[in-house]
Amino acid sequence: MSNVTRRTILGAAWSAPVIAVAVATPAAAASETPRSSLVFTNLTATEGKEPNALYVNTTVMNETGDATGPVQLYITCGDQVKRFSWSSIAGWGVSPHVAVDFYGLPKETNTVYFLVEAGGAQLEGRVIVEAPGWWK
């Protein structure tokens, strides 16, 4: 039996396991709303250098030639919610880069939820981060 593990191969680059998921859904399941034209082009959450902190980043892209808006973005971790809004995202354009920090998180697996709403469509995503052993 080999003593080589995934963590041995990847080294320090994966100090905290992360899982990212993004799903496009219509605003109302029974509606005639077309499939979302929005995608996350960056969806990350990583442990901060301070204990019990996560650094979170995202951008949203409009994959059609038509502008969409207004745009609302919500990023949630635990009971903390960060909200961003734009009047629109141009056709084939991207939102401004969003970078937020969450502090005071418990020493456990934390899930960061992303929700963007625009033009009658929703896009949801999440990133799961396992708390590193050195957190308090």
Image (spheres, grey):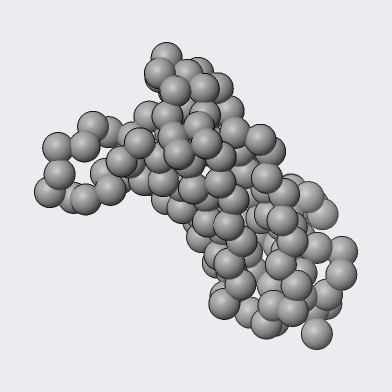
How far from the left and from the top, in percent, is residue 126? 50, 56
Instruction: Please state if 131 lies on the left or on the right of 32 as rendered.
Output: right
Instruction: Using the image as rendered, state which of residue 23 and residue 130 is in the foreground.
Output: 23
Tell me the quarter of the image containing the N terminus.
Answer: bottom right
Residue placed farthest to the front in the image? 87
Any part of residue 112 in sight: no
Instruction: Please state if 19 lies on the left or on the right of 124 as rendered.
Output: right
Instruction: Please state if 127 lies on the left or on the right of 97 as rendered.
Output: left
Residue under the image location 80 percent in, 85 percent down: 136
Any part of residue 48 in sight: yes
| Quadrant hosting residue 23 | top left
**Is 5 placed above or below 39 here?**
below
Instruction: Using the image as rendered, state which of residue 70 and residue 40 is in the foreground.
Output: 70
Instruction: Using the image as rendered, state which of residue 7 and residue 101 is in the foreground.
Output: 101
How far from the left and from the top, in percent, is residue 40? 52, 38
Residue under the image location 15 percent in, 44 percent down: 31
